[in-house]
């Protein structure tokens, strides 16, 4: 049985923490590959994305380009509209078939919010959840089962990276070099109206 990790997000922008999260989940859960799924319009985000869907997608592609076990899915971007996890997992269940075991990777902060997700009961039947810890978000007693993965490393978020970009501070070493090059070449440091 093929073991597939699904890692969705706005990736606004993708950073080293996302890649470490995927690699850690892959190693600890013995996954064959991890599929990164950039969202089109995330239903839970109140602040609009800083970078366009095209830019976010290209940065994810650049970030995983040289990692054979990582790939990028266009499903949510091509579907358009709000990106609900249950729709995405239904798509992968149908596409990959019953021989694939699906693991939906979330941060330790998101695991506490899963009960509020659309069609969570169906989602629990379609995949297993993998919670990757994040500093400052201790695991508690959740109402459902999940696989706990421990990631050593750094506290980092796309929000912090965006703040650094807008403040004119360096994000070198926080994002892959190819992503940094793209941000510079596309002039994404500037605030867009």
Image: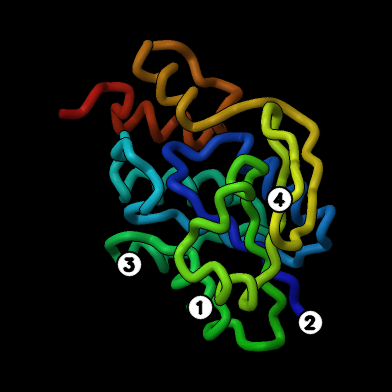
Q: Secondary structure at mark 3?
A: helix
Task: Examine the image and state in which quarter residue 172 appears.
Answer: top right
> How did the renderer colour the structure?
rainbow
The residue carrying mark 1 is 90
Q: Secondary structure at mark 4?
A: strand
Q: Which mark is residue 47?
A: none
Tell us which disc is closer to us: 4 or 2: 4
Q: Earlier in the sequence, mark 4 or mark 3?
A: 3
Q: Which mark is residue 131?
A: 4
The foreground one among 181 and 120 is 120
- Give coordinates of residue 81: x percent, y percent: 28, 62
Task: Examine the image and state in which quarter residue 152 appears.
Answer: top right
Tell us which disc is closer to us: 4 or 3: 4
* Disc 2 to disc 1, C-alpha distance: 18 Å
Tell us which disc is closer to us: 2 or 1: 1
The foreground one among 14 and 40 is 40
Which residue is pictured at 63% across the width and 62% down the height? 104
Which residue is pictured at 45% across the width and 65% down the height? 118
Answer above or below: position of 185 versus 125.
above
How many numbered markers are drawn? 4
């Amino acid at each position: 049985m093929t073991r597939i990790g699904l890692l969705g997000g706005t990736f606004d922008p993708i950073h080293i923490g996302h890649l470490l999260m995927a690699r850690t989940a892959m190693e600890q859960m013995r996954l064959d590959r991890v599929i990164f799924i950039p969202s089109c319009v995330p239903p839970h985000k109140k602040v609009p994305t800083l970078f366009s869907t095209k830019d976010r997608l290209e940065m994810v592609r650049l970030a995983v380009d040289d990692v054979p076990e990582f790939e990028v899915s266009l499903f949510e971007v091509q579907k358009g509209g709000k990106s609900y996890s249950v729709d995405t997992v239904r798509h992968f269940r149908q596409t990959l078939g019953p021989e694939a075991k699906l693991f939906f990777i979330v941060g330790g902060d998101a695991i506490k919010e899963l009960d509020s997700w659309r069609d969570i009961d169906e989602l629990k039947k379609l995949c297993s959840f993998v919670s990757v810890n994040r500093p400052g978000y201790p695991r508690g007693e959740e109402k459902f089962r999940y696989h706990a993965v421990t990631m050593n490393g750094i506290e980092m978020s796309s929000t912090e990276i965006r703040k650094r970009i807008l403040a004119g501070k360096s994000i070198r070493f926080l994002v892959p070099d190819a992503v940094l090059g793209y941000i510079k070449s596309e002039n994404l440091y500037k605030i867009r109206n």
